[in-house]
Amino acid sequence: MNNKNKIIDHLQLTSAQYDERLFQIFWCWCQKFGKTINHSQQLLANHGIAKWWYAEYEKIEARFIEAMPHLPLHTNSLEYHYFGFIDQMNTIYPKPLIDAISVSVQKEEIKITKTLPTYYAN
């Protein structure tokens, strides 16, 4: 049984609920490390960022599964501890990948700003 199935089983989630939570956690992470909404969207859409993020997420889930035998087995308690483990994602980020996206987003925003016509109110 893989980590996802173990988590779904112990937290009593459906696969769709797990996937929705995973997406929400990733989107919140992108918003935290994105400098603007456009930058956050670029982080969300970037394959390299997503690949790195999911690899780190799987490592944290594996640590949670290792700790599960030492945790209370009530669903609410497990869920509380699960989010405690997952919160570690908010402290890590791939600086070189994010910086590369920041530069490309800034260039695109500057290009858009320069091409927009200026209108003055009378």
Image (cartoon, helix red, strand yellow):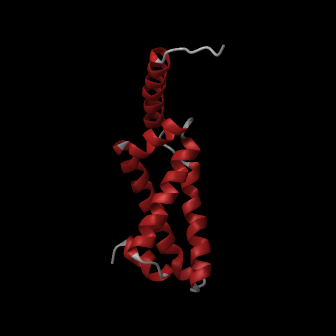
Q: Position of residue 24 (x, y in %)?
A: 50, 59
Residue 97 in which image quadrant: top left
| Nearer the observer, 26 or 80 | 26
Q: Position of residue 89 (x, y in %)?
A: 54, 54
In the image, residue 96 above or below residue 28: above
Which residue shows up at 44% across the image and 16% down it?
115
Quadrant position of the N terminus in the picture:
bottom left
Evaluate whether residue 71 shows in this view.
Answer: no
Q: Position of residue 88 (x, y in %)?
A: 57, 57
Evaluate whether residue 89 shows in this view.
Answer: yes
Give the left or right position of residue 70, taking residue 16 as reference: right
Q: How many marks?
A: 0
Quadrant position of the C terminus in the picture:
top right
In the image, residue 47 above or below residue 2: above
Which residue shows up at 47% across the image and 74% down it?
65
Give the left or right position of residue 71, taking residue 60 as reference: right
Which residue shows up at 40% across the image and 55% down it?
54
Q: Position of residue 2 (x, y in %)?
A: 34, 73
Residue found farthest to the bottom = 74
Residue found farthest to the front = 122
In the image, residue 64 above or below residue 26: below
